[in-house]
Amino acid sequence: MKLTKRLNKVFSKKKAPKKELTVEQKISRRNFISFGSFLALGSAAYGGWRWLYTSPLEKKGITAQAHAPLRAVLNTNEKIVRGLYSNQNLVKTYPKGMAAKTVRHNSDIGSAGLVDVEAWKLVVKKSNGEMLSIGIDEIMKLPKTEIIYDFKCVEGWDQISHWGGVKFSDFIAHFKLDAETAFEYVGMETPDKKYYVGVDMPSAMHPQTLLAYEVNEKPLPPKHGAPLRLIIPVKYGIKNLKRIGSINFSNTRPRDYWAEQGYDYYAGL
Ligand SMILES: Nc1nc2c(c(=O)[nH]1)N[C@H]1C(S)=C(S)[C@@H](COP(=O)(O)O)O[C@H]1N2
Ligand SMILES: [Mo]
């Protein structure tokens, strides 16, 4: 054969047309591929689960127990939450016009009924055993701070509300309680001790935490905790104790009404 002829033959050689797959073949091929990925993903997941399951149990505190990798995630979450509300991070605030004119009212355990504001005293238990007994006038003489923020209740409602009072950190400085801030927790109770909360020190000392005596620029009515309540924007409503009777400091968790009912002790937002 002549070269040209041979080349011609090579180049003109038609490929046999690729046989079209039938619809059924296409489906089964796709199924095969997805079944393959299912197997691959499935075994990776199983491997991951085995890894978790066989990892050692880690303890944190007395209650929380989780496999190490999960505990690591929980610890990271707590660090992120704590980090978010560390002293440089502020809860979002709103203009006055956005504050609710009618402020929602919730439960009144330990703060029901009227209170004799003149007779009322805030009792501060110092670590050296000393007790301070402070009247509302003394507290109202301290620099006033106001905050308008979204108050959130664990029951699922929230409302932008406007509070005024003294920053907890200003109160600490004024009454020379700096040494007490070395403790891990602040405990607060109503005068009758029926409602009580424990708060970690960083949240108590957060610049937006107030001992509040006003709502919408007027003295707190009894239903909102007259004469003094805690406003702690980094926490859910449950920690915002109304009608504070006493404050104490400790390195062990102070008793906490809702934590005793199974709610998260930290109750951070
Ligand atoms: N003394 C006392 N403080 C309390 C409570 C309570 O029952 N008693 N309830 C808490 C809860 S669950 C919420 S949501 C807020 C509600 O505050 P408010 O009634 O001013 O809206 O108060 C908190 N502080
Ligand atoms: Mo609440």
Image (cartoon, helix red, strand yellow):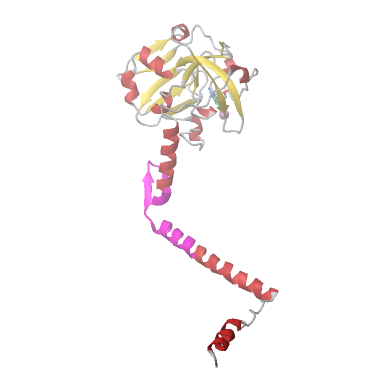
Q: Is residue 30 left or right of residue 235?
A: right
Residue 221 on image: x %, y %: 59, 13
The answer to whether residue 63 is seen in the rendering is no
Examine the image and state in which quarter residue 104 appears: top right
Residue at 44% x, 41% y: name it.
Answer: 77
**In this view of the protein, which residue sits in the foreground, 46 or 244?**
46
* Residue 64 highlighted magenta (yes or no): yes
The answer to whether residue 181 is seen in the rendering is yes
Residue 231 on image: x %, y %: 50, 21
Residue 202 on image: x %, y %: 39, 27
Q: Is residue 51 left or right of residue 111?
A: left
* Residue 62 highlighted magenta (yes or no): yes
Q: Quadrant of the N terminus?
A: bottom right
Residue 213 on image: x %, y %: 52, 13
Examine the image and state in which quarter residue 168 appears: top left
Report how many numbered discs are placed on residues in the image: 0
**In this view of the protein, which residue sits in the foreground, 40 or 76?**
40
Q: Which residues are magenta?
A: 43-70
Residue at 46% x, 30% y: name it.
Answer: 256
Q: Is residue 181 left or right of residue 235?
A: left
Looking at the image, which residue sits at the far bottom?
A: 1
From this view, report whether residue 254 is shown above or below residue 178.
below
